[in-house]
Amino acid sequence: MDYQTYKDEISADVAKQIKELRCQPVLFFGSGISRRYFGAPNWVELLQELATNCPLIDKDYAYYAQSCSSAQQIGSIFADKYKEW
């Protein structure tokens, strides 16, 4: 498969998923593109911001950082809180 065909198939698949799921995607770039070029927060900074913005997250980020085993675990907890909110 050539590169153009690959891009076309991926683009069609993404468009199909957006239509079927009826929501916009959230993209995470692991290569630092968003931080370098857009000044986006890193993972911990994002979690800290999320902790301050959601009224259902009733403890500071530091509590979760000490209580949880990973940033991914904190993210899952916060995702549940945001979904409920």
Image (cartoon, rainbow, N blue to C red):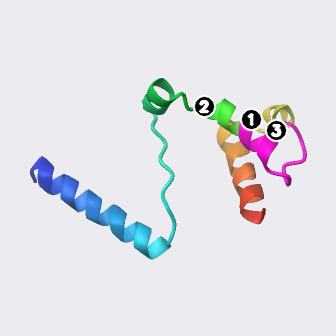
The amino acid type, in three-letter code, at marker 3 is: Tyr
Where is the C terminus found, in terms of image quarters? bottom right
Residue 11 seen in this snapshot: yes
Q: Do residues under tags 2 and 1 come within 8 Å of each other at their CB atoms?
A: yes
Crowding at mark 3 (Cα within 10 Å: few <14, some 14-19, many 20+): many
Residue 40 coordinates in the image, percent (x, y): 56, 32
Report the disc number at residue 48: 1
Q: Which mark is residue 41?
A: 2
Q: Residue at x 74, y 35 (%)?
A: 48
Read off the magenta span: 48-60
Q: Is residue 81 left or right of residue 70?
A: right
- Residue at the image position 35 percent from the left and 70 percent from the top: 16
Is disc 2 placed on a helix, strand or loop?
A: loop
**x and y percentages locating residue 74 in the rendered image:** 73, 43
Q: Which residue is mark 3?
A: 64
Residue 69 in view (yes/no): no
| Residue closest to the eye, 62 or 36 | 36
Q: CA distance from mark 3 to mark 2?
A: 18 Å
Q: Residue furthest front?
A: 38
